[in-house]
Amino acid sequence: MIRVPSAAVLPKGTFSDEAARYFFRDREVELRYHKMIADVFKSTAGGATDWSVIPIENTIDGSVSLHTDWLVHEVELPIRAEWVFPAVQNLVGRLGELALNDSGDRIAARVWDSAKIVKIFSHPVAMAQCYEFIRAHIPHAELETLSSTAEAIRTVHDNPGQGWAAIGTRTAAADYGLDILQESVTDHDNNYTRFLLVGHRVYEAAAAPKHKTSILITLPEDYPGALHQVLAAFSWRKINLSRIESRPTKKKLGSYYFWIDIEMSLDTVLLPAAIAEIEAIGCQVRILGSYPSFPFEG
């Protein structure tokens, strides 16, 4: 009997859930949902699931530092793939409760009345991505953040008649039988999230448009200009870096490592040579993964 592979994901109805369904749309994978990102990581690290689906970067908010630190400090889970998915936020509630008037007219009932919304729930990142919309259309509403957009929509569902609304996904709205009051309420149209698939199981992928490699570099303390030497090792070989970010090593004040995403597979001549040159000057290099990269095709 062939076992169906499994992936740990944040709660059902979140963008992580939608992104996972999109990524695994052509294959059979069991999605197992967890409330906290720590539980997602622990599920795969402990062997309960084959992979974890991790949102790692957003075009509006940048890197998700908490998730980065988990990959670096808490677990040893290789990156197996990455893909990009649009983060489309919606204003969700009950049209019957928030209708423009109480006449019962079916057309009027399709128009929501901002004055009737007294509180809005969402994840703090999602809330921040819709700040201008909220300020322009519902500035009087109280804002409350929860652990996920799915939890926000569930809270609205469980408390009818309160004048509450949520910001979240179309999937969660459908799951809880709520209405989309307003579609695409994010302040920027180019709101995309980059997801990583991490785990001990190899991800067998069809031909990908490109491959990337992610590494961690810790500089030697007694080598002035070490970062310049690191970048030079890539530069003269014409190796493109798509991301470089410094994060504290958590060992002492002023000690940092550098997370570098490289637009090249490790199965080349140039990249291993660059890494060898970097190690030769005393840098510590940790390979986080060499993996296929998939753009969004919607």
Image (cartoon, helix red, strand yellow):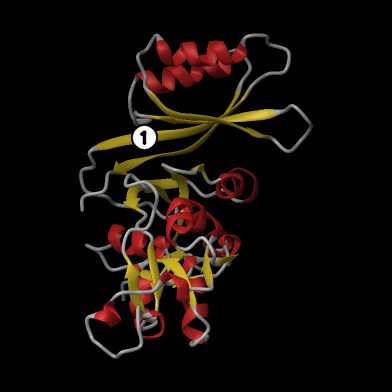
Q: Toward the viewer: 162 or 252? A: 162
* 255 shown above or below 75: above
Q: Residue furthest right?
A: 252
The answer to which image quadrant residue 53 occupies is: bottom left
Kindly tell me whether residue 156 is visible in this rendering.
yes
Q: Toward the viewer: 141 or 158? A: 141
* 261 shown above or below 131: above
Kindly identify the residue that appears in the image at 37 percent across and 47 percent down: 191
66 left or right of 262?
A: right
Counting other residues with Cα less than 10 Å from the Cα at mark 1, is it few (<14), some (14-19), or many (20 or more)?
Answer: some
Image quarter where the N terminus lies is bottom left
Kindly identify the residue that appears in the image at 39 percent across and 53 percent down: 186
- Residue 245 point in image, percent of width and height: 54, 31
22 left or right of 243?
A: left
- Residue 119 point in image, percent of width and height: 54, 71
Determine which residue is flagged by label 1. 212
